[in-house]
Image: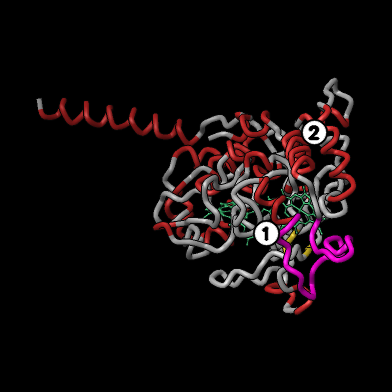
Amino acid sequence: MKKYFILIVVIFSFFVLLQCDKDEDINYPTNSKIDLKLPSNFPATKFNVAGYEPTVYGVELGKKLFYDGRLAKDNAVACAFCHIQENAFTHHGHSISHGVEGREGFRNTPPIQNLIWLDKFMWDGSVTHLETQPIIPITTEVEMDETMSNIAVKLKDDKDYQRLFTIVYGDKNITAERILKAITQFVSTMISADSKYDKVVRNEGASFTADEQQGYTIFKNKCATCHATDLFTDQSYRNTGIPYHPIFKDEGRKRVSGKDEDFLKFRVPSLRNVEYTAPYTHDGRFQTLKALLDFYSDGVVDNPNLDPEFKKVPGKVGIPLTETEKTYLIAFLKTLSDQKFISNPAFAE
Ligand code: HEC
Ligand code: HEC
């Protein structure tokens, strides 16, 4: 009797082992490239995608990492915690960023969109390569406060990751480089170019209302030097006469260059999806577009670095705007909203 029992156990174990072996030999799907559709009204891209060509599973892996709280020390603060899709990947309701344990940073979360057209990243251009960008939030104490090697330890037993890393990179090893490459693939696919404005300028059957058209005309006269091209930024750093923040002490581009002439200069932000990305500017000090335009018109503070664009009207600093002009401008800015982008399942969790 005992012999039979042992025999049954042995045979059973054999089949269990056979099953395990099968798992190892899973037929993984082949990974194919994704062709990014570059909008015809955009300027040339800046990012050299060689080595980062988005693939179906590379992007899927990048997205999974983007939404995974385990990239943070507290296992809760994912990239998507601060970059929320319905707000064009900004942190709605937060002037400055809040990371692990509610720790506060000193800057407003910018949207993640059209990154492959950008030359440098962050409000002060301190990051020059898209691939290295995620290291900053991951390792910053007030953001995710984690290390790349510990992330690898936390994820290595996760079957979904083992599968995805194998499909994308050939084996299940998780390394910092592989994590960063996958996130880069994912964020480089986040293109927003389907607003009403785009449909008007590309002649895709849309047209501006009278108010929007008025706003567009004012915009071209008073705003488009800095908010230039269909990206709505010339990617330069400018001093808009915004008063220095006594608590955050953010010196802007000077933090990077060390030069006094860069004091309080910030990267001109794109205005795409600005309807969804309140609050505004580098420290989110303006809650509404109206408040920002009131500032441009009447709040600009003169200083040695103030941009010449804000000194065009003799005897006044700023960009004088009437209340009606502000209404028109806001109507125009809302034509930059891309409903499809903020609801696209390809970018959702
Ligand atoms: C705690 C909130 C927070 C988290 C978490 C976070 N970010 Fe950010 N992100 C920010 C802030 C704030 C900035 C602007 C920083 C600056 O200008 O110095 C930023 C900037 C960026 C930029 C630059 C955008 C541009 O236009 O220059 C990218 C890209 C980005 N984050 C991607 C990510 C990714 C990927 C992750 C996850 C690995 C992540 N972020 C996690 C708050 C956060
Ligand atoms: C001299 C260049 C310049 C001009 C002209 C200019 N802007 Fe700006 N704009 C900037 C800079 C730089 C910032 C970021 C300032 C900061 O973060 O402190 C900004 C910020 C903004 C923001 C906030 C966006 C965000 O994501 O936080 C809006 C909206 C905006 N500008 C609209 C306009 C409009 C409308 C006009 C025309 C009336 C205009 N700007 C003219 C340079 C300019």
Dot placed on the residue nearer the N-terminal end, 1 or 2: 2
When the figure is inspected, residue 216 is found, relative to residue 130, above or below; the finding is above
SS at badge 2:
loop
User: Residue 8 at x, y = what percent?
Assistant: 22, 26
Would residue 54 be found to the left or right of residue 68 on screen?
right
Q: Quadrant of residue 304?
A: bottom right
Which residue is label 1 attached to? 122
Numbered range of the magenta stretch: 297-319
Magenta run includes residue 313: yes
Query: Dot 2, how many residues are within 10 Å of its Cα: few (below 14), some (14-19), or many (20+)?
Result: few
Q: Secondary structure at mark 1?
A: loop
Q: Nearer the viewer, residue 330 or 111?
A: 330
Q: Judge whether residue 135 is colored magenta.
A: no
Q: Quadrant of the N terminus?
A: top left
Which amino acid, mark 2?
Lys
The residue indicated by pointer 2 is 37
The residue sitting at the top extreme is: 205
- In depth, the one of 224 and 145 nearer the eye is 224
Say which residue appears at 61% left-offset and 46% top-offset: 278
Tell me if residue 139 comes above or below residue 219 in the rendering. Answer: below
